[in-house]
Amino acid sequence: MVPSVPAPAVSNRIALVEDHPRLASLVERGLGAAGIAVDTFATLEAAWHGLLRLPYALAIVDRGLPDGDGLTLIRRLRAADNQLPCLMLTAKDALHDRVAGLDAGADDYLPKPFAIEELTARVRALMRRPAEFRELHLIYHGLQILPELSCMRHQQEQISLAPAELQLIILMVRAAGQVVRRTALEAAAWGVSDAVTPNALDVALHRLRKKLAAIDAPLALINVRNLGFSLLPSDAAA
């Protein structure tokens, strides 16, 4: 039986499968500036296990990796009936290479070298494609999230967000009042690459509550005992 892979989540965290440290760092910085968090994996096997652990929004996959061709990972995903959007990165730009990538199940194809602006645009386009993804500028009960500016806004008030706070509020807003479990929140905020202390989530949510109050947002972050957290209109949470 083929192991199941989590379906894509409504977060801004993506998986990058790239073994070149300099290129990986460039992509991480470029997408991070657009409010998109990145977990980097240097091998196909590490990426597969990472994709089993977290429901990423998208995967960027290099073809030339130490343990094989990135197309193998995409085929493996599709064999598991997982439709995670996949963007191929490769130095191969021949027509038959592009066709091979698309036939393997890739959703888009970007040859190296590339401009980070083009990569960001393609990532955003793929993240908009599935029905479960909403617009990149999120609005919920008057609260607007602007990922590329790492901030949130209510009426005329605006406040900046730390990277973890940004990923948390994006996930909470997209949940639209539904309860989000602690594990999902931690995964969205820190992924698999960062060590997280036991109270890191509580600290980040405490800071988010203070920032929501600072801009007079009519929303409350509610702790639903033994389940998780939800973001509700203040009058409904009272």
Image (cartoon, rainbow, N blue to C red):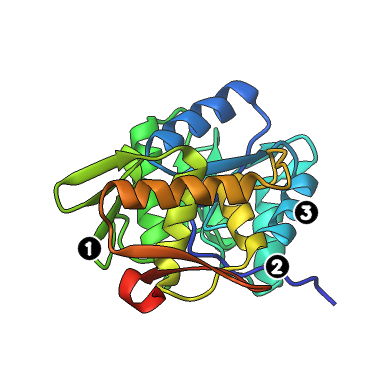
Left or right of 169: which side holds 142?
left
Residue that carries the numbered disc 3 in the rendered image = 49
Could you say which disc has been placed on residue 5 in the image?
A: 2
> What secondary structure is marked by label 1?
loop
Foreground label between 2 and 1: 1
Is there any visible trace of residue 97 in the rendered image? no
Q: Residues within 10 Å of mark 3 (few under 14, many from 20)?
A: few
Q: CA distance from mark 2 to mark 1?
A: 35 Å
The kind of residue on which mark 3 rests is His
Q: Residues within 10 Å of mark 2 (few under 14, many from 20)?
A: many
Q: Is 9 drawn above or below residue 123 in the view shown? A: below
Q: Residues within 10 Å of mark 1 (few under 14, many from 20)?
A: some
User: Which one is earlier in the sequence, the residue at label 2 or at label 1?
Assistant: 2
Observer-nearest of 52 and 11? 11
The kind of residue on which mark 1 rests is Gly
User: Which one is earlier in the sequence, the residue at label 1 or at label 3?
Assistant: 3
Is there any visible trace of residue 7 in the rendered image? yes
Quadrant containing the C terminus in the rendered view: bottom left
Give the residue at x 52% y 51%: 205
Q: Is 164 drawn above or below residue 108 in the view shown? A: above
Observer-nearest of 40 and 171? 171
Quadrant containing the N terminus in the rendered view: bottom right
- Discs 2, 3 touching: Cβ within 8 Å: no
> What secondary structure is marked by label 2?
loop
Left or right of 7: which side holds 125?
left
Give the residue at x 36% y 61%: 128
Position in image of residue 228 (x %, y %) = 61, 68
Residue that carries the numbered disc 1 in the rendered image = 142
Observer-nearest of 119 and 160? 160
The kind of residue on which mark 2 rests is Val
> What secondary structure is marked by label 3?
helix
Identity of the residue furthest to the left in this view: 156
